[in-house]
Amino acid sequence: MPLLTWDELPAGGAVRPDEAERLRTGGWRTGVRPEADVSLCIDCLLCWLYCPDSAIRLEGEAFAGFDLDVCKGCELCSVVCPTDAIAMVADDD
Amino acid sequence: MIEPRLLTGGQAVAEAMRQVDPDVVPVYPITPQTPIIEGYAAFVAAGRAHGELLDVESEHSALSAAVGAALAGARTMTATSSQGLALMAEIVYIAASLRAPVVMAVGNRALSGPINIHCDHSDSMLVRDAGVIQLFAESAQEAYDLMLLAPRLAEHPDVMLPVFVCQDGFTITHSAEPVALLDDDTVRAFVGDYHVSAPLLDVAHPTTRGPFAMPDYYFELRHQLAAALHAATAVFPELADELCGLTGRRYRALEPYALEDAQHVLVCLGSTGGTLKDAIDELRAEGEPVGLVEIRSFRPFPADDLRAELADVRRATVLDRADSPGGAPPLFADVAAALNGSGVELSSVVYGLGGRDIHPEDVRALVSSSERRAYLGLRGEPCPV
């Protein structure tokens, strides 16, 4: 997304919810990213519940992977996963 | 128009607040501003003003509450002086950057230390670069008039910034003079209703205010603030014309006085303009080609107007009621920047710190002096620079 000029920005930098959805804050990620072994996943959705952002994707009520555009690499999902289906791996991107 | 009444500047501004009738007024008392909020509180107690008067625990809280109220969708006013403004300073920057159109009456008073309660402009200058509009009144009448204009200026869609209406502590806040008020209905019609885009209480259109800005956006948002202040330069004369239609009193971002054929022009802020006008009348009667420019809008600073008004003068003497130890006094710095390359000779006079009076004979002395840098009435030789 190209950076906006001063006169393209809303007054005072106000942010609307639809704009927040477009922000790719995953650029701040800490150096690790989650990786799931879906054969172990029981769709308990604890990872979705605990994720402080919106980095867990769902299909209906089933786990459907990660949205790395907003994942910060906090590791909470891998810690709360009861079946150890989520591992943190080096983020080389 | 109602017959002029004998009012102090504080009372006149309290009357303006009653007539504008803001929705929320968070306050904390401090001399010499206190008569403003006491006067307004008496109107609320008597049922003659209808704002939510919030007695908060500090000026920091007063301005914080004002910012929240203004963004929530309420017309908001407050008032302060000196240490109160210093305690608010953090929130003054935030109010400006969040584009909260809070109107604040300032009774200018020297900053500590040493502690002092009398007038100078060091408090206003402390927040000079915050991005707020600062208008300086010469008299109680001007403080009243500017307090009516302030909400319109603050809330103008091209501006959306806090506006300070500054009046000299005690010299104006506590001195009674005839003040002509408009009638209440005329004021209500002039100020109109409060509209901001996307007020926080409009839950159908939620917004986040005050988001974090990283190096990729902070600079742009600060420049946006500078552009809004610049926009106020064009909005002020439109509103001043409209108000003049009601009062017969016309305001400009600067007020020229006796500039025709003037060779030596004085420049000042605030009530000292009245003293200078008297002194200039006497000097003019003796044939001295002396004039005056009073800066009414210190921020945004009317640099283009000043350059145009002083195009043909030989010398300008800038009177600052605040010093900048180790640097150029603030008004002098702005005037020097505006006149850079014009060939006008510039002198700087710091005067009146901590409420020390300035008299017409002092003005006579500084007009005849060839000093480029002076400290009016200072005992002892000024330190070298």
Image (tube, coloured by chain):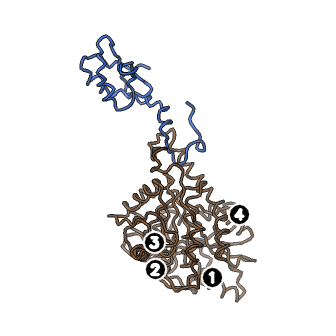
Q: Could you tell me how far apart the alpha carbons at marks 2 and 4 are, in whole angstroms?
A: 37 Å
- Tell me which label, 4 or 1, sits earlier in the chain: 1
Q: Could you tell me how far apart the alpha carbons at marks 3 and 4 are, in whole angstroms?
A: 50 Å
Q: Amino acid at mark 4?
A: Ser
Residue under label 4 = B342
**How many residues crowd mark 1 within 10 Å: few (<14), some (14–19), many (20+)?**
many
Secondary structure of the residue carrying numbered label 1: helix
Q: Are marks 1 and 2 on the same chain?
A: yes
- Tell me which label, 3 or 4, sits earlier in the chain: 3
Secondary structure of the residue carrying numbered label 3: loop
Identity of the residue furthest to the left in this view: A82
Q: Are marks 1 and 3 in contact (CB under 8 Å)?
A: no
Q: Is residue B230 left or right of residue A25?
A: right
Query: In the rendered image of this protein, which colour is used for chain B?
Result: brown
Q: Which chain is blue?
A: A
Q: Amino acid at mark 3?
A: Ala
* Residue B319 drawn above or below residue B7: above
Q: Amino acid at mark 2?
A: Phe
Residue under label 2 = B170
Q: Quadrant of residue B334?
A: bottom right
Q: Residue at x 66, y 73 (%)?
A: B244
- Tell me which label, 1 or 3, sits earlier in the chain: 3
Quadrant assignment for the N terminus of chain B: bottom right
Residue under label 1 = B277
Secondary structure of the residue carrying numbered label 2: loop
Q: Are marks 3 and 4 on the same chain?
A: yes
Q: Is residue B308 left or right of residue B158?
A: right
Q: Chain of mark 1?
A: B
Q: Is residue A81 left or right of residue B189?
A: left
